[in-house]
Image (cartoon, coloured by chain):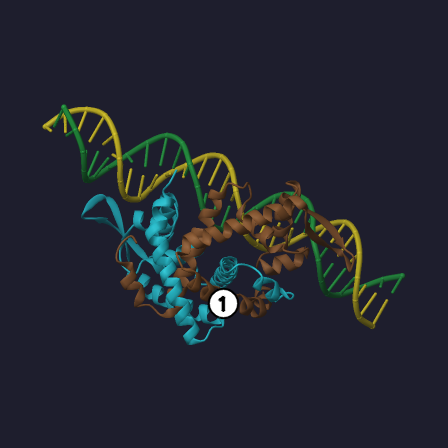
Chain colours: A brown, B cyan, C yellow, D green
Amino acid sequence: MTHDDSALIRCLSSEVQAMMGVYALYWKLEESLDALEVGLSHQECHMMVKLERPKRMGVLAADMLTVPSTITSTADALEEAGYLTRQRDPEDRRAWLLVLTNKGLEMRQVLMSEAGDLFRRASGLDADETAEFARLARKIRENIMKTGIPEGLKK
Amino acid sequence: MTHDDSALIRCLSSEVQAMMGVYALYWKLEESLDALEVGLSHQECHMMVKLERPKRMGVLAADMLTVPSTITSTADALEEAGYLTRQRDPEDRRAWLLVLTNKGLEMRQVLMSEAGDLFRRASGLDADETAEFARLARKIRENIMKTGIPEGLKK
DNA sequence: CGCATTTACTTCGAAATATGAACTATTCAA
DNA sequence: TTGAATAGTTCATATTTCGAAGTAAATGCG
């Protein structure tokens, strides 16, 4: 704590307190990702995590709340590095499925376990608190995935 | 939800579930910030929020987990727009205090109340859940501010 | 005191990232 | 079969971020 912010923060609405915590955590986690020195950009790490199973690029764009062209270049990099391959989706041959290679699956395991450590260290929460935080975070994520995507395509 | 992810996600560790929620929320909030059309970049919004009281640029850099030169350019933009002024810190004349103008204070109020709305809509949590989430988020933020900053200066 | 070192911020050019408009290939609908 | 819609790609551009070198003020130390 740089100063006595904690007292000031308690004066804010719960929503704003929550946001500030989320921002701090996000920034901290992003910073820690660099320290992993795993040779992947943040976006590439996120894509690896999202690929628990083969997914279409459009689905990933929606999941990652980003734009198709970003997915293309991220996938290019991961393919180049040997972590995934593109396979035509048999159900719609316009679409590609991104499929992790064995090397990709291994890297994903590493990332997931490192991610757990990062969260534990950054948050400082005990197991119960983490479980409760995870429950709410899951609920939030479900809400966003449900309501957010249409909005994201607005304009 | 693009598919039946919710079931898959429950298989992950609490830590990873928490992270995925935090990421989704962060991305969603950032996206919504654009829609605010308030003429400020994300970084500029964040700085406005952090300036609940005058702060040194170095302190802001630590708070925002970023680099001094980024703070300089963000502060330049906000000064240009009339939201803040630089004042020499009487305690150390090398340092500047960034002080919100009246216009800046008004904008900060707008941002804070909009932020509350954004969180409410994005998260979909009720008041109790929000309070609980805020409690944990505050705890996390305190932990990060306490432990995180020295690490951030490593290297 | 006077000089070397550290600290706080700035400058500016380069690197990394993100974005959108125009394009190819495929599907769908009539 | 043809026109419109969709999935992804390309590429040039905009935005953001970073870091090395510079200025000015403070601090430490003989």
Q: Quadrant of the C terminus of chain A?
A: bottom right
Compared with residue B133, is residue D14 higher up or lower down, i.e. above or below?
above
x then y, percent, for residue A66? 58, 57
x then y, percent, for residue B146? 32, 52
Disc 1: host chain: A
The residue at the point 48 percent across, 71 percent down is B121
Q: Is residue A142 left or right of residue A125?
A: right
Q: Is residue A54 left or right of residue A131?
A: right
Q: Is residue B102 visible?
A: no
Residue B80 or residue B62, whichever sits in front? B62
x then y, percent, for residue A139? 52, 69
- The residue where tag 1 is placed is A135
Name the amino acid type tagged 1.
Answer: Arg
Q: Is residue A136 left or right of residue B92?
A: right
* Extreme residue toward the bottom, this view: B127
Compared with residue B55, is residue B10 higher up or lower down, i.e. above or below?
below
Q: Is residue A33 visible?
A: yes
The residue at the point 26 percent across, 48 percent down is B96
